[in-house]
Amino acid sequence: MSLPDTNTYTRADWTACMDKIKQRDKHAYALVFYHFSPRLKQFAFKHMGNEQVAIELVQEALATVWQKAALFDGSKSSLSTWVYTIARNLCFDLLRKQKGRDAHVLADDIWPTDFIPPDLIEHYSPEHEMLKKQVLKFLDLLPEAQRKVVQAVYLEDRPHQQVADMFDIPLGTVKSRLRLAVEKLRNTIEAEQL
């Protein structure tokens, strides 16, 4: 069975694919599995730091997609947003269960959902190099304090706490500068696309 190029799939294509999965269509599920498993593995590995844990997390996330397909509503979110949210929640659960790990690593420090609009999660996922290019293009429009934080977090992939220590500012300040910068960048990018 040869699979079509899912990289060209639109939100509507994925919603139609999920409608088939709700009818227990295994071919449609195979498309979702093959498209998302490498991306989710990269996503999980980046945040969990362990390849075996990442692989198990991907399996669990994609099993959840099959089992809970009926809960997916294409009018409320895109498939990638839904899938990454499932994976993110599984990561949170795992982090909570790991007692011996650093207790100060909170889910909010890893994924600051307060500044990522729910339907834009897909734009922050690992495979979107496009965002980095757009961020680079408009970086100079940001005030210096915001620009430094955005550069450290998005372009250098530094954890928020490390950025706070690096610039000797509170963690909350890092998050609010990011939130303001992301808002400004999004408005600028949207204005350019009009």
Image: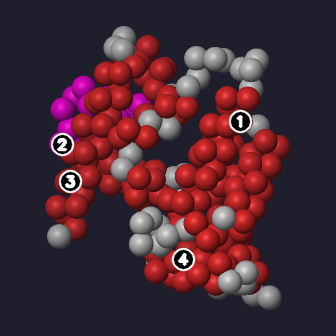
Depth-wise, is mark 1 or mark 2 nearer the camera?
A: 1
Which element is circle 4 on? helix
In the rendered structure, which disc, 1 or 2, sits on the residue that comes first in sequence? 1
Neighbourhood count class around disc 1 (C-alpha, 10 Å): few under 14, some 14–19, many 20 upward: some
Residue 111 image offset from top left, x and y in percent: 50, 38
* Residue 52 shows in the view: yes
Cα separation, mark 4 vs mark 3, equals 26 Å
Compared to residue 171, the image places residue 62 above or below, namely below
- Residue bounds of the magenta highlight: 140-152
**Amino acid marked by disc 2:** Leu
Q: Residue at x 74, y 76 (%)?
A: 30
Discs 4, 3 touching: Cβ within 8 Å: no
Mark 3–mark 2 Cα distance, whole angstroms, equals 12 Å
Residue at mark 3: 187
Q: CA distance from mark 2 to mark 4?
A: 35 Å
Q: Residues within 10 Å of mark 2 (few under 14, many from 20)?
A: some
> Looking at the picture, how far across and down is residue 19, in whole percent?
59, 81
Q: Which residue is mark 2?
A: 141
Q: Position of residue 99 (x, y in %)?
A: 74, 20
